[in-house]
Structure formats: C-alpha cells, structure tokens
Image (cartoon, rainbow, N blue to C red):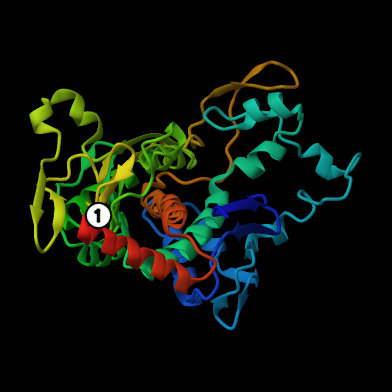
Amino acid sequence: MSLRYLTAGETHGPQLTAIIEGLPSNMRLDFEELNFQLQRRQKGHGRGRRMQIEQDVAEIVGGVRHGKTTGAPVALIVRNNDWKHWMKVMNIEPTEGTDEEKRRVHRPRPGHADLNGGLKYNLKDLRNVLERSSARETAARVAVGAVVMQLLAAFGIKIAGQVISIGEITAPPNDIPLDELMALTEESPVRVADKATEAKMTEYIDKIKAEGDSIGGIVECIVEGVPVGLGSHVQWDRKLDGRIAGAVVSINAFKGCEIGIGFNAAKLRGSQVHDEIMYSEERGYYRASNRLGGFEGGMTNGESIVVRGVMKPIPTLYKPLRSVDIDTREPFTAQVERSDSCAVPSASVVMEHVVAWEVAKAFLEKFGGDSMEEIRDNLNNYLEQLERY
C-alpha cells in the first residue's frame, strides 16, 4: 500500500487532524522527538503573536500501541489553544441573524486565497477560505513529516535544513557536516550557521517589520544516507525530484524550487554542471561532485539530496495593499489579519518535513513491507545486490 496522508482543520478551529496510512508495524515512535519537531516550527525571528499563544503538541489517537505502530492508520491531532477565543465565530451550528454572522469577511486580501476561494466555492464569507488556506495547516504537515522522519532515521537517513537568504541578506556557502549543521541552525533565531549573517538578518527583519512590510527568502534542505534508486525514470510522475519539487511548492507562500545548483545550471557549460562518475572498492560507484543535488533521471544516485525552496513575503501587511470589497465592489485597503513579518526560518522547518514525506514515500515504494523487519530485509537484499553489481 502506498504511503499517504490527509489533514483537516481550520486555523481558529478546535484542532488540526491528520491521518497517515501505509506505515509499517513495529516502528518505534519517540513522542518527545515528534513534539520537538513541532516546537521547531514555531521558532524564528519575525514570527507573530500566534506563536506565543500556541504550544503545539501532537496527540496520537490511533495506530500506535505501547510506543510502536501497529500497521493500522496513525491518527494524530494538534489542538489550537486560540480556539477558546473563536468558539462563536467558528461555531459549527447555524448563526444566521446573530452578531457572529455580521463578522463575516467580505474584503479579500491580495496574495491570499481569499478571493479565488470565494469565487471557486461560491462563498460570500471569505473566512471559510482563509481559515483553511492559512499556514497554520503546516503544523499538521510537520507532525506527519516528523513521524516519517523517525521511519527514515531507523534506516540511517538524516534530514537537515538551513536558511540561505532573507531578502537581500545571503549566508556564505558552507560544507558543514550534517549533525553540526543541525546543532548550529537550531541555536540560531534565523536558522543560519554563520553568526555574522544571523546578526544582519535579524536587524533586517526588524527594519522590515518597523516599516509595516514583510520579507521572504530561500531555504535549503539536505538529506543524507539515501540509497541509489529511489524514484524512477519510467514515468513522469514517478520521478522523485519532480515529486519533491511539487511538494515544496505546495507549502504556503512557496513560489519556486530547485535541485542542486538549480537555476545556476542555465549559466554554465555542461562540463561545469554534470557530476563525473567514480568507483572505489570502499564506496562502490559515486560522483566526484554533487551539482545535480543527488538526482539523475528522476532517481537518487547515492549522493545527498539538496533542495532549495523560494518563499515569497507574507502577503498580510501592516501597511495594507489595495483590494475590492465583494459586497460593494468598491476599492479599499485590505484588512489586516494577525501575521508574521518574516516566516522564512519556520518555513525551513516545514520544508524539511515535506521533503521527508516524499523521500519516505519513495523509500517504502522501493523497500516496502508490512513490518519494519520486512523492510529491513528488503533493504539489505538490495544493498547486497548493489555491492555485487
């Protein structure tokens, strides 16, 4: 069975819910690690007041017994502490003729799903759109990704992320070992390894916030320990780099993705782009470089996966942009919903978990079994096959 998940819930509803299907049995689940990943998403210089209200904790309500998965769907919830302030506004019962009905949202915000969603679903209260399209949903996606991160870790696959740039400020390139990179970025409020860049970025974010504006940036995800051959060249929708790119752009406010050197490849000659193939008794086949970010032909080639995502500035501004009231068709300046001035450090964490999901899905397609033991046998048999090749 293919690994899949669904999420449900609104930003000011009682909770976010996720169901994961296709996990093997006998996978140990570290609940502290799961919740640590959720807490990582809430950090970062430039976040808004919502992060002070919510203390995200995932509750497992199905599919796990005595600390291990059973093979049944895993159900988890993340409660919204802010729900208590929105119980009337978000009541599931009819509210026609009440004061809450008068609080409907009829002024769409530029850059959000408000107007498109209202037109598509014929909704005259745009809160029905913004509640679900909110980036709050990424808490559920991080929880899902945190579960499969533990699956991947059991087979020696590690994932880390870092911020490459925020607005005009770019961090210097680094080649830091993954464990060290994890430690350094975890201590940084903007998730960069370089302290001088960190100071420049925090000052820059404060400046943007004081101006009532917002700023985006570029984040990077690195996956180590991935075996050769995840994904496939035989159909377009089985190419793992394509699936990862689609997943990255599905994150709220992400507008682009690149693998390896990405768009820089357009400026270079072929001899400066492609990774030469080498062989040694110790390593087997490997690449002399990793400009293609761990992929050739839509498949992993044994090198580290390197993915970058571009996040646009948050569209909710404290110096509002122009829009049109859907009731009167008259122009106005868009109303402000609570927001962040910069969510790039948090987005780095979200991207780690989204990439983890796609890698885990491809991993189980290749080595899948009903139990962790069966998967390990399948993986070991494949690794022996590679050694003999």
Q: Please indicate whether residue 292 sits to the left or right of residue 235 in the image.
A: left
Using a 10 Å C-alpha cutoff, classify the residue at mark 1 as few (fewer than 14 neighbours), some (14 to 19) or many (20 or more). many
Q: Position of residue 245 (x, y in %)?
A: 39, 38
Task: Write the residue at 54% across / 54% down.
Answer: 3
The N terminus: image quadrant = bottom right
**As rendered, which of 274 and 41 lies closer to the eye?**
274
In the rendered structure, which amino acid carries the disc numbered 1? Answer: Val
Query: As drawn, is 128 to the left or to the right of 203?
Result: right
* Residue tagged 1: 192
Which residue appears farthest toward the right when viewing the image?
97
- Give the secondary structure at mark 1: loop
Residue 292 appears in view: yes
Decide which of 99, 59 is in the foreground and name it. Answer: 59
Query: Percent x, y for residue 68?
Result: 55, 77
Q: Could you say which quadrant of the image residue 64 lies in?
A: bottom right
- Front-lying residue, 81 or 97: 81
Give how far across and how far down residue 108 sits, in percent: 63, 28
Question: What residue is rendered at 44% in x and 58% in y?
Answer: 41
Above or below, 248 relative to 282: above
Give me the residue at 27% from left, 64% from top.
Answer: 384
Split into 4 quadrants, where in the image is the C terminus? bottom left
